[in-house]
Amino acid sequence: MLLLKDLRLEWRQKYAVSGILLYVLSTVFVVYVAAGETTPEVWNSLFWIVSLFASVNAIVKSFVQENSARALYYYVLFNPIAVILSKIIYNFLLLFLLIVVAYGAFIFFIGNPILQFDLFFTALLLGSLGLSTALTFISAIASKANNSASLMAILAFPVIIPILLAVVQLSSYALQEVTMANTSSSIGNLIAIDLVLLAVSMPLFPYLWRD
Amino acid sequence: MIKNSYKLIGVLILIYSFVVGMIVPLTPGIVKISPQRANTGEKLTVQVKGYNTHFQQAASSLRAWLKLSEEYAIAGEVAEVQNDVDLVLRFQVPAFLPIADQVKETSLIMDNAIDGSSVLPSAIFISQDSVNITLGDELWRRTPIEHLSERTFTTFPFRNILQETIRNTYFHVSLWFAMMFLFIAAVWNAVAYLRKSNPFYDIRSVAFTQVGLFFGLLGVATGAIWAKYTWGAYWSWDVKQNTTAIALLIYFAYFVLRNSFNDSERKARISAVYSIFAFVALIVLIYIIPRMADSLHPGNGGNPAFGGEDLDNTMRMVFYPSIIGWTLFGVWMASLITRSEKLNEQLLELE
């Protein structure tokens, strides 16, 4: 139900999502103007940099947008676990959409060096799950502080770098024609990171929530 | 008295590990030799540079071999002992190798009554033009390596790339272990704060984090000095160096977060939550990510793990105590910070 609420809220503020999508498209355009035709490795790193900044921009408002009256309303009505879970799922869907759009824009403007599509898709899925969990949680922390937006960046970047390193490596395997020997262990690591982040943010969130 | 004895124990252990860690000499070893190539049948004169050796004192018992494999070796003779660390050896390289390869590497083994035996792996490459395995077999079996002497004093292992910097183990590695223990203590206190809401736990958690971060910075600094010596640069963008830098950033962010609250109850609660979250990210960074990439550190990317020959029993006698010493010292520092913070709060209340 909360998930539906978030979706409906987003639908009402269509300009926000379309703003972020436009942001993705224009960054990809700038990337092409600046870098031109690139090698697959550069393509990979540029792709994840664009996705990273788009995700931070998209998620920063997820708790900040809730005004205090509405927060109190939720606090009375819902279990905090349900709140964080619905936020994470909603942000996961949003990020996945964003990253897929970014991928589409990259194909359209720059080209598609991905040779193993299923592997790349796995990387996108696991990467957006990890990013959405970490960023949602950090935005919950930052929303409690005075200067949320800049604090969000400071707190989030060190925490998402492990996810980003893992996901960049996994998608670099997708650039190869042959399956690399340690692909499955790399996927395993990424799943482990995602699960650990989920497992930590669930029990900790009630303490953030209580105000 | 008993409550505070850990401070005394910590300081005594640290003094012990400083003194022993600095005084015990390295095992005598061979630093370099020249030339490093030879042909079969050649009369070879080799200049040897030793380290911590006692060539002059032990001149009468000096022996040397070129070792090709377990069963094949040739003995050499000492031509001239120049001083304790320089000498000249002479070898009569046999006319054939006992194998069919064109080039084969041999190790130099030296032995004397004081220093015991020392080895320089891949010392001399011997090439042959024609092959005669049977004759080579006979020639290389004449002078087997036997009756090696025992070293007469206690030492730390000699490693050609590390040399004296092997003593940094007691600082770089131990500080790093102590930092981990302090961060665990910080997380423990953060959890305790969330459960009991007693401000005392918050103060303690912050104190442990501060000391842990300080130890982490010292660990990076000692590591950078070590890296300059062994890898050639203070910072080589090694995966573990990078993850460490990020881990330290996480803890800097922790202090930025604390400074952005006015309400102290809220500050304590939210920073405790972040501290637990950050610790989990730290574990991922330090124990999962480095496994996915090659590292210059021991135990990664085909490098031998630290341990085995590098960490012998003499070093363990200093290394393990130094971890305990640094940890106890860090706990003492944290307890001082905790006490001064508590006094500060009382002072504020009085005003």
Image (spheres, coloured by chain):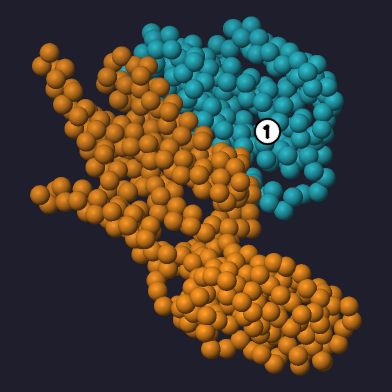
Residue at the disc numbered 1: A124
- Image height check: is A79 above or below B54? above
Residue A83 visible at all:
no
Q: Which chain is orange?
A: B
B325 or B167: which is nearer to us?
B167
User: Could you classify mark 1 by the number of other residues whose Cα lies within 10 Å: few (under 14), some (14-19), or many (20 or more)?
Assistant: many
Compared to residue B40, the image places residue B14 above or below, namely: above
In the image shown, does A98 or B296 lie closer to the viewer? B296
* B171 versus A115 height, above or below: below
Q: Quadrant of residue B215?
A: top left
Foreground of the two, A94 or B108: B108
Q: Residue at x 48, y 57 (%)?
A: B164
Quadrant in which the C terminus of chain B is drawn? top left
- Picture colour for chain A: cyan
Q: Chain of mark 1?
A: A
The answer to whether residue B52 of the structure is visible from this angle is yes
Residue drawn 48% across the image and 82% down it? B113
Disc 1 marks which amino acid? Leu
Say which residue appears at 51% left-offset and 34% top-offset. Answer: B246
